[in-house]
Amino acid sequence: MTIEISPATPAEYDAIGDLTARAYAPSHMLPDDPYFDYLRDVAERAAGSVVLAARNNGKVVGSVAWCEPGSEVAELAMPGEGEFRTLAVDPEAEGGGAGRALVQACIDRAREAGCDALVLSSALWMTRAHGLYERMGFVRVPERDWNPTPDTRLLAFRLELR
């Protein structure tokens, strides 16, 4: 696969929303869980972040929402930290490098923005992603783990950039 990363276009939002919902299907959330509405609403994410798309031969195979310091969409970031959210790779494209390329694009943007660190939250079931984050230098920060709902635990990861 040859992966190219750049900001998503509004014409790609539906495809990104669909692939994000498919990527999050193993979460065991019920199909009518309201979070799936959020996952599909790429325009809402793009209003408060930069939605990046990973493309292979022009086809969108993944995306991530990059949140600059101070972004209203960020959930975990503290002053001086960038954050990324809703990293998703089409299940049919897993293992092709899109996830790594999207994370690297966020690292690059965080460095360009002068961030001290880059943070993210990840669900317990996302063990494959956890391995990627750790291989790329992120470390767990359990003191920043949190629960967006009573039944959902999110693990915090941080990459020191300075």
Image (cartoon, grey):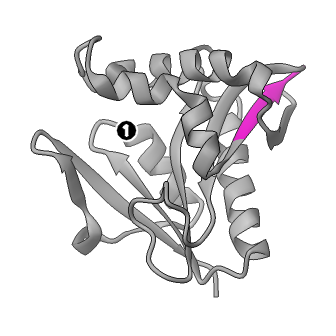
Looking at the image, residue 70 sits to the left or right of residue 8; the answer is left
- Farthest bottom residue? 162
Give x and y (percent) for residue 41. 52, 27
Instruction: Tell me if mark 1 has few (under 14), some (14-19) or many (20+) residues whose alpha carbon lies within 10 angstroms of its own.
Output: some
Residue occupying image coordinates x 37% and y 48%: 122
Q: Name the main secondary structure of what is drawn in magenta.
A: strand
Residue occupying image coordinates x 26% and y 20%: 33
Give x and y (percent) for residue 58. 88, 20
Looking at the image, residue 35 sits to the left or right of residue 146; the answer is right
Is residue 60 at least partly visible in the picture?
A: no
- Position of the C terminus, as image quadrant, is bottom right
As for residue 26 lying within the magenta part, the answer is: no
Along the viewing direction, whichever of 99 and 49 lies nearer the viewer:
49
Total number of numbered discs in the rendering: 1
Which residues are drawn in magenta? 52-57
Is residue 13 at least partly visible in the picture?
A: yes
Q: Quadrant of residue 68?
A: bottom right
Along the viewing direction, whichever of 36 and 72 lies nearer the viewer:
72
Residue occupying image coordinates x 49% and y 54%: 73
Mark 1, secondary structure of its residue: loop
Q: Is residue 64 above or below residue 162?
A: above
Amino acid at circle 1: Met
- Which residue is disc 1 drawn over? 126
Q: Is residue 62 above or below residue 141?
A: above
Residue occupying image coordinates x 28% and y 70%: 144
Q: Is residue 93 above or below residue 137?
A: above
Q: Is residue 56 above or below residue 49?
A: above
Give x and y (percent) for residue 28. 24, 21
